[in-house]
Image (cartoon, rainbow, N blue to C red):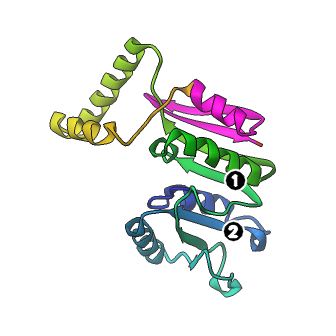
Amino acid sequence: DLGCSLGAVTLAIRSALLDRQDLHSVRLVATDNSEAMIARLLGLLSELDIPTRNAREPGDDRLGPLPIELNLADIRDVPLQDASLVALNFTLQFLDPDDRDRLLSRVASSLRPGGVLILAEKVHFEDAGEQERLTEWHHDYKRLQGYSDLEIARKRTALERVLLSETESAHRDRLERSGFRRVTRWFQCFGFCAWLAER
């Protein structure tokens, strides 16, 4: 889970795997470059009584089933190898476009045959009218969730210079250039999309 934040994806994957019999060969690695996020995730996992370990230390079979390995690192530099599944959720959009290409190429080459990448990103639309309508609908949704117009405007301003969204076709093109043989969009809500990219 690259850019794991508070570990929602890692926890979902772990939950889905717990009934399997062959857990001795499974490693779950949650990586984030924010020390505060890793600390908060460690606290959350402790509250949930989920075993953890530092990803840079040797494994310990006494930790119990499916410990989560916590890795404080920049996803652009983290070693990737022999993976069955990589998740990148709303993380790529904060990287420089050249770094996106390099990271996805590394992810693709690290996957086992048949391995998959789950990628979720905010997208923008080539048609200005479509973009405007979807943005307004998303803001309406936020208002229904109790956000004020000021809060919505502040968040939009804060993300304007750091979140560099792309079109869906740009994401698909990059995934194909990176070595993924099949890309399927499995989710979209407003300007948020998720794809399954198969190696």
* Up/down of 185 relative to 1, above or below: above
Q: Is residue 191 magenta?
A: yes
Question: At 56% from the left edge and 33% from the top edge, which residue is drawn?
Answer: 187
In front here: 23 or 86?
86
Quarter that holds the N terminus: bottom right
Question: At 32% from the left edge and 36% from the top edge, which residue is drawn?
Answer: 160
- Residue 16 numbered mark, or none: none
* Element under disc 1: strand
* Element under disc 2: loop
Q: Is residue 161 left or right of residue 83?
A: left
Q: What residue did someone put label 2 on?
A: 27
- Residue 85 numbered mark, or none: 1
Q: CA distance from mark 1 to mark 2?
A: 10 Å
Residue type of the residue flagged with mark 2: Arg
The image shows residue 166 at horizontal and vertical percentages of 49, 30
Question: At 59% from the left edge and 24% from the top edge, which residue is drawn?
Answer: 169
Which of the 4 quarters of the picture holds residue 31?
Answer: bottom right
Which of the 4 quarters of the picture holds residue 164?
Answer: top left
Q: Is residue 165 left or right of residue 137?
A: right
* Up/down of 186 relative to 51, above or below: above
In front here: 18 or 111?
111
Magenta segment boundaries in residue numbering: 169-198
Quarter that holds the C terminus: top right
Crowding at dot 2, Cα within 10 Å, few <14 / some 14-19 / many 20+, comes out as some
Q: Is residue 189 magenta?
A: yes
In front here: 50 or 155?
155
The image shows residue 49 at horizontal and vertical percentages of 50, 77
